[in-house]
Image (spheres, rainbow, N blue to C red):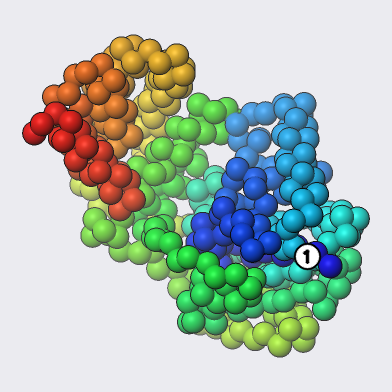
Amino acid sequence: MREIILHIGMNKTGTSAIQNSLYGINSYGIRTVRFKEKNHSVPMKTIFSKRPARTWKNIGLSDNQIQEKRDEYKKILEGELADKSINRFIISGEAISDLTEIEQKDLCLFLKRKKLNTRIVYIVRDPFSWAVSVNQQRAKWGEKSLLVVNPHYKKRLAGFMKECGKENISVYKYEDLMKKGLIKSFSKIIGFKLEEGKRVNESVTSETLFLLYALNRIDIATVGSHKHLRARVEIIRAMQSFFSESNGFKKIDLREFNLVAPSAAKDLDWLEERFGITYPSPWDNRSEVRDFEDCPCFEKIMEFFQHYNLPYKSSLSVTENIHNLYTKFLSFAEIDGRIDVYVKQENWYDALQLITKSIELGDQRHRAYRHASNFSYRLKKLDEAVEFAKKAVIAKDNNFKTQERHEKHLANMLRISGK
């Protein structure tokens, strides 16, 4: 009987690395379902959840537009599962475990109707380290302070246990998989050798978390449209790049705080009883959660603002200053949107004029310089293309992947210009 492997998370257990390795598999009768996204959370939640996915709410889609997305994703899934040449399908999305019990059961029934044997792969993590990572992630999503959270191990499996059967569910400790190599371990789980890709360290420093909470407290929306979300993503990326470990800032340490809800004790008992997985108590020797006030050096904050030609005003609060910076990033996002239109029209002259204006306004993102280099090249302005390419390489918001791409681009521009 053909089968499907559902990797349902949980979140913060190396899912991005796993999904990068799974993407594009289509050989020996094994295929990763070909949604355009590497992470199948949004496609699967859009199809099977009765609540709109956060993604669509953040960009302001209407109910009719969300239904169109649902129909589009379902058509892809139906088409994939109808291919009789595939014996094993793989779907990976950590938010699949966020489905309600009824929605989980509906998903299982859907796959049964397709005559597929369903295997559930569920990876759990120590509740305290999970709570630390989740707090960092939720700050990016808009939370304004530290939260006491519950991993809800049982809830994430309830519907799958009832409809797919415990015998088809495999639960693994993230810590054990990491000891043997996450991708190597996951390869054995699915029966297919995966390639280990490069991993970007996305750890949040204390300074970044402090500024994220300030961003989340400003009095204008940072989601709800493409433009606002684009500006939010870019300003967070800028914070993380500037206040990164590679720039000498320290990884955040939240070990003193008790971030795990007492109700998680029942889940820990359940996990041990059902699957023999044990974790130490996360509540020993930790203080109650309070407002996160680990403020960075204000000289560094001022330096961060200077990168975007915006003075940090000591007469204003941190939140008010971040409000001003976000407004500037909104102007960058508006220009980006207009540039996208010109690119579709292959109107390189007006695209270059706009991106140059953005740079003059203080836009020092690596993507701005790369766009300027590309547009200059299209217009045969090779000297300008080289100079913009150099700036893209040394831009402060690079990570190793983007810097590597820009170095290759610069080498190509130097070769073409004969320099």
- Residue in the image at 89% along x and 69% along y: 162
Quick check: 410 above or below 204?
A: above
Name the residue that disc number 1 marks: 3
- Residue in the image at 79% along x and 54% along y: 84
Quadrant of res 69:
top right
Quick check: 348 above or below 116?
A: above
Q: What is the quadrant of the N terminus in the image?
A: bottom right
**Considering depth in this image, is 135 or 9 the residue closer to the camera?**
9
- Percent of width and height locating residue 257: 50, 70
User: Does residue 259 appear anywhere in the picture?
Assistant: no
**Considering depth in this image, is 343 or 329 the residue closer to the camera?**
343
In the image, is 393 to the left or to the right of 135?
Answer: left
Question: Which residue extends farthest left?
Answer: 419
Q: Determine whether the residue tagged by mark 1 lies in a helix, strand or loop.
A: strand
Q: What is the quadrant of the C terminus in the image?
A: top left
Name which residue type carries label 1.
Glu
- Residue in the image at 48% along x and 65% along y: 195
How many neighbours does mark 1 have within 10 angstroms: few (below 14), some (14-19), or many (20 or more)? Answer: many
User: Does residue 137 appear anywhere in the picture?
Assistant: yes
In the image, is 229 to the left or to the right of 29?
Answer: left
